[in-house]
């Protein structure tokens, strides 16, 4: 049963990345892996989530969210990085260019974004 849940999660992620339902995969985007029970995700939403769409960065890297559930994360013992929410993955021309794992503060988030996008 656990293997089927893990396989389903993998298939969902493959479908999201290869066969988007609503729109084509944007050349550039910021993908946020989040969970509704994640306290740090909620803090990010309050500190950054409300202003991110208004930034110049959002014009080049629109935000898309993937919501994970507690059951699927707890049963994926092989993929450590998907257990940490929030995780932010930057894509440029459909290729990953950087990743931020976790959230500690707005200042640290923007510093990491600058590092990934080469604004330093």
Image: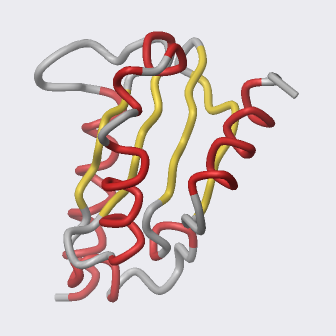
**The one of 101 and 57 positioned closer to us in this rendering:** 57
Q: Quadrant of residue 49?
A: top left
From what the image shows, is residue 95 above or below residue 103?
Answer: above
**Rendered view: 82 above or below 19:** below
Q: Quadrant of residue 6?
A: bottom left
Quadrant where the N terminus is found in the figure: bottom left
Residue beneath the point at 27% across and 67% down: 35
Residue at the location (40% across, 80% down)? 76
Q: How is the image coloured?
A: secondary structure
Is the residue 94 above or below the residue 116 in the image?
Answer: above
* Left or right of 67 in this view: 111: right
Between 9 and 106, the one nearer to me in the picture: 106
Q: Looking at this rendering, what residue extends furthest in the right direction?
A: 120
Residue 101 lies, in percent from the top left, at: 60, 61
> Residue 88: x percent and y percent?
51, 48
- The extreme left residue here reads 22
């Amino acid at each position: 049963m656990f293997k089927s849940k893990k396989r389903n999660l993998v298939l969902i992620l493959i479908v999201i990345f290869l066969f988007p339902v609503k729109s084509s995969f944007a050349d550039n985007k910021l993908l946020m892996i989040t969970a509704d029970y994640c306290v740090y995700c909620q803090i990010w939403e309050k500190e950054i989530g409300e202003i991110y769409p208004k930034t110049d960065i959002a014009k080049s890297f629109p935000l898309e969210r993937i919501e994970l559930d507690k059951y699927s994360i707890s049963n994926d013992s092989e993929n450590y990085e998907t257990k940490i929410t929030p995780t932010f993955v930057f894509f440029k021309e459909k290729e990953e260019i950087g990743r931020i794992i976790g959230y500690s503060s707005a200042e640290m988030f923007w510093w990491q974004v600058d590092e990934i996008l080469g604004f330093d």
